[in-house]
Image (tube, coloured by chain):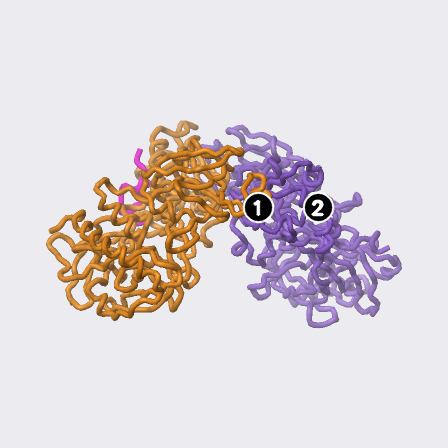
Chain colours: A purple, B orange
Amino acid sequence: MVRCLPIWWVCLLALVGGQAFANPSALRRSVFRIETISQDRNFVNPWRLRSPDMSSGSGFFIGDGRILTNAHVVSNASSIMVQRDGDARKVPAFVMYIGHDVDLAVLGVLDDKYFKDVEPLPFGSVPKLRSPVTTVGFPMGGDQISMTDGVVNRISYRTYVHTDAHEHLLVQVDSAINPGNSGGPVFQGRQVVGVAFQALTRAQSAGFIIPVPVVQRFLNDCLDGSYDGVPEWGVETQELLLNNSATARFYRVDNGERRGVVVSRVHEWSPAKGVLQRGDVLLSISGKKIGVDGKISFEGERVDFEVLYGLRLKGDAVRFQISRDGAVQEVLVKAGLGKPHQYSGRIYAKRPKYTVFGGIVFTALTRSVMELWGDAWEKRAPLLLRYMMREPFEIEGVAEREELVIVSDVLVNGANSFVVIGSPVVDKINGKTVTSVQMVHELLNTMVDDTLRMDFMFDDDPWILSAKQLRIVNEETNQRYGVTPSFWLEPYSVDAAISKDEMK
Amino acid sequence: MINFSKRILILAIIIGPLASMLSSMAHAKVQKKRSRSDYERSVLSLSITKAVPDPDSPWAIQNSDVAGHAGVVVGDNLVLTQASVVSRAVYIQAQKVDDVSKIPMRVVFADYDANLAILTPLEGYNLGQTRVLPLGPDIPVGSDVTVISIENERHLQLASMRILDVNVREAMVGGTTVPMYSLGGQARSSCRSDLAVRDGLLIGICVGVVDQQPQIITSGIIAHFIADKHSGDGYRGFGSFGATLLPVTSPWHRKTLGLEDGKGALRVAVINETSPFADCLSVDDIVLGIDQINVDHRGFFMHSQWGAVPLRNYIVTKYAGDPVAIRFQRKSEVKICSRRLRRYSSSDYLVAGQTTEGPVSHMIFGGLIFRELNVDFLTMFGRDWQNNSPASLLFVYNYQNKPSLTRRREIVLANVLGDVFNAGYEKLAYLILDAVNGKRVNSLDEMRLQLKAGGVLREGMEFAQFDFKDGTQVVLPYAELDETHQRIARTYAVTDPNSFFKK
């Protein structure tokens, strides 16, 4: 009788058709409320932090002392507290792993006994369309756990807004996902089928969950003790062309079943560089046929073929069947990180990279800088910056740079008081093409010239300053404006969220 | 009937004696009070019917648009107005405020870069009794002026305003930069073709409102335009030296250049490939003066009426073809370069201004509509096109838009008229062309020639191959092109057979 109970419950649920969550009281103990104090970075004066901000989210126990939540719940966090449902205690937590590209994080607590008697929640699979799901978490409006039912509306491949630069598989549900729900489990029966993470603000009841394949890939990536990230693709394709019989003939794929997409561009930094080339027709990935619309069959649904590539780990070989000049062949692309989305994704680092010299603040052009113009930065920000952000590889002389360096501010002193920021993107310093903040830092601090000449991209008015005067006022300017440290050159992968070492 | 040159001569004679009298008057910034009736014989109501191409379907005309504007009598049966209000006009009528009859008019001459035009009645018509409104001189900042607009087609409205500043602005998008007065006072939302007068003299014509301040093309520019047309040598236009000069503001830079305090200098920031000075001036040369004019530390010179103003105010007093001598410093050595100014029209730039007459150039190949990237094309994104156009196109307009010896135009795939022939490509739009059949093209004419020269042979078929800058590739066969074009012409009502590519 005891063994049959869950089955009986499931049967009953199936009969009443809608209730998806089998035994709330048994599973809710594994769901946590997460409270954070975070400080966003200041991308104009990068040595500063913005005012502390308190927020909350949800998470759930996945075993081995780990709580899974969203990256955005704990990003830039200087304090993380977790609280189990039904338990008044709040326990400090730290970030074990964080994947901003997939908006997932694994938390740990210092007290191992905290998870005694807590069962890890088991993962299921990708839920079917129209199947019922239950979202569990601690949304705004109260401290108690909340459970809302809904159904799966859509399974697609879309942008995860946390970085706003990475696309992955996601599942749209019609149950409400509100602030505070983030990181909470979404159940089907007793199994977790996803992690609640974002919602459409302009549509009612349109929430999104991160499906299990993306979650499992993240957890697998962390198994070796560090998170590498989702492999970059760097290949652009044209879909639907091969619907056109003449075009199919041009690409010599008009015999038999018509399928595949045409490669239109392979970026220099792409792991597929040297393997794929413009004009290749991608016919299949990992044995799955690619339709003329660029979609494959995946878990019973048609989704973009890039989904499969994005589920691979760094170093995995991904098999493609291609047609090149009519010859069908198999090629292997070694999934790699390539060039990160340093131009287009939001940055969650300890600090933005910067260096200050003579009151001139240099930092890298990133998505986070663009958001100084607000959410509508794609309309409001200066054209030059937004175009460089969105289409960096369309502009001559940009692709080969590690990053674009900008002057984000000028801390006025006697040596720089006349300068006016036009185009802020630094092209050259004393004739040398600038490729990174690190390079700027080294150039300025080893410079022996009398004159500092800074040329800016798409600006005909260079700055010509006295290098000697800038050196003289450098330290005093930093003191007066509270610039400390005077530079920060750590890579963006050094995350801002509190780590175990920092807790100690 | 007096011919155009003779009539202008009469106007010049009127201006002559007035000039000396006015120079003494000009110092009195408060104008004498005048009534509406003083201008009723000089200011005409213009009713202008335009046929403007549909930006989405360049072979078609949008609904005709009738608008009212002001014109001013500047000679016997000669009326001055803004060029932009008569561009693409198919029917123009002039009416005196005290007369019910409407006189059909035509454009005698227009300089669209300077945004000025002269109209005259059609053959067999006459404006009747009118009074020439003489041109006044340039007047100082702070002077009061009266702005005359036409309300309800025949009613003159007078508003008192004051000259707040003189700036150098484009007379129209992509046009010549000329001095303009910025006026303060109760501004209308649009002031196009309104007239600024003072003491019974024409001071300027309004071309638009910036920051709620009407912008007035000055009488000096109008006089230049009229005298140029009258000169008998053919219209030469406003001169330019095809370079961008910027003031040297850095104290350290000034010191390294040996410029003492207050000594003026301009750095050559850009020198166009097509500049007449391209062979003697280089970027980073330091310009010390032009002709006998010295510049101050801001790069300004002293204008007799306006005080310190940008050097462009001096250059626009010249005609294209006039010689000027630039005195400049290169590595401590002072040199002089004398060349003749040249006229720069908006069509000299990579992104041309609005086409003012004739059809909008375009070409349809298998449903793909190709157009040259120009302001005409960009205006399809609405009045706020400078913000709403695709960033890739705005980037070209804002950052690559220079006169060039080698690059003439960018070609854009504007959109696609969907058809079975172009299936798979129907969603493409606003893509900048890189090459046609493997070769870069600089104009639609070059593109036609390149397509006619033959395409890519593959699998026994001949294909036209279009490569775009973003990597997109379109390949369509030459075969069945004629039938496709006939079908598309029927489906989308493309009435002009010249719209289509013909091999």
- Mark 1 and mark 2 in contact? Answer it, CB < 8 Å: no
Residue matched to label 2: A472
Q: Residue A274, percent across and down? A: 60, 30
Which residue is most to the bottom?
A: A142
> Does residue B281 appear in this view?
yes
Q: Is residue B486 above or below residue A91?
A: above
Q: Residue A266, percent across and down? A: 57, 36
Q: Residue B382, percent across and down? A: 40, 56
Residue matched to label 1: B250
**Predominant SS along the magenta part:** helix
Chain hosting mark 1: B
- Of the pair A76 and A235, the residue shown nearer to us: A76
Specify whether residue A180 is painted magenta: no
Q: Which residues are magenta?
A: B484-503
Q: Residue A368, percent across and down? A: 63, 53
Mark 1 neighbour class, 10 Å CA radius: few under 14, some 14 to 19, many 20 or more:
some
Q: Is residue B323 above or below residue A419?
A: above
Q: Answer left or right for A174 relative to B172.
A: right
Chain hosting mark 2: A
Looking at the rendered structure, the kind of residue marked 1 is Ser
The answer to whether tags 1 and 2 share a subunit is: no
> Does residue A390 appear in this view?
no
Disc 1 to disc 2, C-alpha distance: 17 Å
Quarter of the picture containing the C terminus of chain B is: top left
- Of the pair A351 and B44, the residue shown nearer to us: B44
Q: Is residue A144 above or below residue B348?
A: below
Asked where in the image residue B434 lies, by quadrant, the reply is: top left
Q: Answer left or right for B190 relative to A499.
A: left
Looking at the rendered structure, the kind of residue marked 2 is Ile
